[in-house]
Image (spheres, helix red, strand yellow):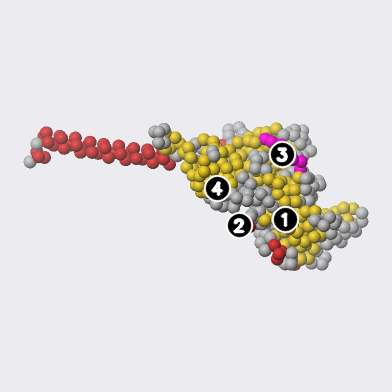
Amino acid sequence: MDFLDPIKRRNHTIRLFTGYFLVAFIVLFSAIMIVYYASGFGITRSGEVVQNGLVFVSSQPANAELYIDGARRNNTNTKLTLPAGTYTFKIQKQGYQTWEKRVEIAGGEVDHVVYPLLIPNELVTTSLTNFDAAPTLYTQSPDRKWIVMQQPGQDGVFEIYDTSRNPEEIVPNVRIVTLPAGMVTASAGAASWELIEWSTNNRHMLLQRTFTVEGASQHEFILVDTQRPEGSYNLARELGATPTELTLRDKQPTDYYLYDAETKQLRTGKLGSKEFETVASGVLEYKSHGRDELLYVTEQDAPNGTTNVRVRIGGKAYTVRSLAKTNAYVLDMARYEGKWYVAFGSVQDGRLYLYENPAEQIVASTESKASPLFAMRMTGVTDLSFSATAQFIGAQNGARFHIYDIKHSRGYSYVAPFAFDFGAKDRFAAWMDGHRFIQSSSGSARMFEYDGLNRRTLMPVSGQFEAYFDRDYENSFTLAPRSDNQPGVSLTFTPLMTEADQ
């Protein structure tokens, strides 16, 4: 019997362990190859080992031709596997201006080039209705469905236009909202209205109304319910206070931050209650995010001639940095890919800072300090703000821009190649979406991307008003000079797609 023969038994054992070894080697090799493949590694036809990246490419409108380094690839929308490196992406479609950009693909990572917006070669603008004078209030809801206007002399009366309707149906179906009698305080002269912010329910607007009583200028805050005007409130009466500033807490119409410039107290309040909670003292400037997150500049516990920048998260405040005391500050905060980012600086000394998770850094540091992710120099800053997606933080001084891309850890600095038509207050270009700016120049809306590229001249617009869009950025609505050369403005409509794509 073979199993009793020592030689045969030894040979059998050798064959058995050799088989085990080969199986283990194959399993280990396969596992390593899977890991490398998952990390983007591959082998070219020439036998060279490269690390690939996966990139998704989309455009609006879709199904445009995609070229990479001059070679025709798939149409948008598509996904591609490319070796790590920098490529020239070009997207073109008949009837539209070509979109082009250098794109860096990182090995082992997934990137998304899904924001290209193609603009027709020829834009056709039509007038929906004319106004004899420019509206005193012009704003749009966050979901871009509603445009709200107030005409001169119409104190407490608002016109609401639905951008989701067909163009010929928008003006005939305008909705008039009138605040209940006695809602606002009587004024000795014309009162002015200013938007503070919209609630995320796309229904409530928080407005500041400035009026005159016995020769003195006063103000009050009005919460306007655009769907049920009888549900509007004069917040000075409801809260029993008239703070210097009033903002929504967590963008909710029932919760507020109240700031008093004289006492420098920042408090929270709730509709239906006249009790307040002080959340910060010695405040000079603040910016809220969500329900409890807060970034503010305070004199509290700061040596003479300095201020402390603090972030309040989870009900606890942390000092992020000290700044020299100046007359004006810029600050903003946002959440991106699960991390908190705060940006701030003083206008006079021209130093701006960006921090990533500063509260976590302070808690983990033995010295209770946080280190900036990025710092820049820029004097006379007119705006510091995150894009809609929070991937970019932008600082502006007139037509000069400094942008930092958080996702790719990359900065951009440039001067826009055209002069801006600024209104009385807005001395900066506005983020149009997550990747683009928009601002009027020489009577037209100008669009350009975060890095200053792919600049486009769009439709006519009066300089003091923004260009608005519908939900999918397929159509634009602007207030522009009247085509009949009469005084006033015209509400216009401009499709951003050719007839073939509509």
Q: Residue 454: image x %, image y %?
A: 65, 42
- Image location of residue 222, percent across then percent down: 77, 59
Q: Residue at x 13, y 37 (%)?
A: 9
Mark 2 and mark 3 lie on one chain; the one further toward the N terminus is 3
Cα separation, mark 3 vs mark 4, equals: 29 Å
Magenta-span inclusion, residue 156: no
- Disc 1 target residue: 125
Three-letter amino acid code of the residue under disc 1? Thr
Characterize the magenta stretch by its predominant secondary structure: loop
Q: Which residue is mark 2?
A: 500
Picture quarter containing residue 274? bottom right
**For the residues marked 1 and 4, what is the alpha-carbon distance in whole angstroms?**
27 Å
Q: Amino acid at mark 2?
A: Ala
Mark 4, Cα crowd under 10 Å, few <14 / some 14-19 / many 20+, is some
Q: Is residue 414 magenta?
A: yes
Dot 1 surroundings within 10 Å: few (below 14), some, or many (20 or more)?
A: some
399 vs 194: above or below:
above
Q: Of callouts 1 and 4, which one flags the residue occurring earlier in the amino acid sequence?
A: 4
Q: Are marks 4 and 2 in contact (CB under 8 Å)?
A: no
Q: Amino acid at mark 4?
A: Glu
Is label 2 or label 1 in front?
A: 2
In percent of the image, x 30 and y 37: which residue is there? Answer: 25
Q: CA distance from mark 3 to mark 1?
A: 25 Å
Circle 2 packing at 10 Å, graded few (<14), some (14-19), many (20+), is: few
The answer to whether mark 1 and mark 4 are in CB contact below 8 A is: no
- Look at mark 3 in the image and give the residue it sits on: 416
Specify the segment rendered in magenta.
413-420
